[in-house]
Image (cartoon, rainbow, N blue to C red):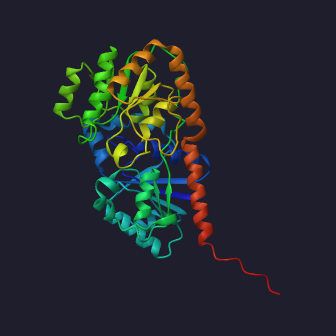
Amino acid sequence: MNIVYFTHSLLSCWNHGNAHFLRGVLRELAACGHQVQAFEPEGNWSLANLLADHGDAGLDAFRQAYPDLHTRGYGARDDLLQMVDGADLVIVHEWNEPTLVAALGLLRQGNAGFTLLFHDTHHRAVSDPDAIRAFDLSGYDGVLAFGEALSTVYRRWGWGDRVWTWHEAADLRHFHPPQEETDRNGLVWIGNWGDGERTAELEEYLLQPAERAGLPLDIYGVRYPTEAISLLERYGVAYHGWAPNARAPEIFARHLATIHVPRRYYTQLLPGIPTIRVFEALACGIPLLSAPWEDSEALFRPGEDFLFAKDGADMSRHLRALAADPDLRTALVRSGLETVRARHSCAHRARELLDIVAGLRQDAAPPAMEPAA
């Protein structure tokens, strides 16, 4: 099958958390024997920021980790029909311009020979619904939503059985425990600051507990305003700025544990969506603790795969226990790896996608002719 994916960027992970999953699932589809081509708009926001901060060297980690992935930039003058020529499946990420989304829908309505899916991996359907409603999806065969709560929103908008819950997952070809263990020290948090969506939660579940437990804390990420940097300095945090997503496994391998602090939209309006950081941590074999969120789809085994903390004091207790108990750390790592490898790899998601497409094609096929009497 010839698969074309329109992403915001495959090259850049600068404030683009979906890059991990998109890279991983496209690589798995290629490994299954499918022809895969990604397109991204020239000068896109994520890539422009990455190059402005780090230059071309900022792409080195991607190039080294994913030499087999093919992505091509395109501009307003490129021929869209030519870009999808021969495609069997076209997927469009929601972080694209409405004009592109609409144009591809028109091609599909013009009896183009491909299946067309819209891929939503964000909270805008509830936080900024007008932005999502601005997309003309009338020519699309269906929607891939990265959590059941988001799928429910699309069903409410009339998509019915043409929306599928397609969770993110870990790229196990790259995200895995280190081949050789070395000394691990302190805590690490990889995440972007982002528009005040979890400022109070970061202080309660990350900064204060690390200080109370007496554990050094390293933080990686972008979009930290001056006041955020000042807050980190008050807590004695080592802030390192941006790190390539492809370097996350080696960063995790140096630390004792990591913490998941979900954005408020994923605890209040879209419960049950863990986002990529949970999958990354479990796949890399680092003990994980989490601020509260509702695992409404039973994706994991809380208390076995990771530890929930009901408040900041509870998080401090968990951190002290983890630091003092190597058997607890080993048990969490073993259980988390077991769950990710059994249910939440990009290979699993590639197979789910192929099943969805096969079902759509079967529904669209004309009925078989009865043999003549």
Q: Is residue 242 left or right of residue 68?
A: left
In the picture as drawn, the residue positioned furthest to the bottom comes out as 373
In depth, the one of 296 and 227 nearer the eye is: 296
- Residue under the image location 44 percent in, 63 percent down: 155
Q: Splitting the image into 4 quarters, where does residue 258 fall?
A: top left
In depth, the one of 264 and 16 nearer the eye is: 264
- Residue under the image location 47 percent in, 56 percent down: 144
Quadrant of the image containing the N terminus: bottom right
Question: Residue 308: x, y in percent?
Answer: 43, 30
Relative vertical location of residue 160 with respect to residue 345 in this rendering, above or below: below
In depth, the one of 168 and 269 nearer the eye is: 269
Relative vertical location of residue 317 with respect to residue 358 in this rendering, above or below: above
Q: Is residue 78 visible?
A: no
Q: Is residue 3 left or right of residue 267?
A: right
Question: Residue 55: x, y in percent?
Answer: 29, 37
Question: Residue 260: x, y in percent?
Answer: 39, 32
Question: Residue 151: x, y in percent?
Answer: 45, 56
- Residue under the image location 42 percent in, 69 percent down: 105
Q: Is residue 284 visible?
A: yes
Q: How many marks?
A: 0
- Residue under the image location 29 percent in, 31 percent down: 202
Q: Splitting the image into 4 quarters, where does residue 291 fall?
A: top left
Q: Is residue 233 left or right of residue 363?
A: left
Quadrant of the image containing the C terminus: bottom right
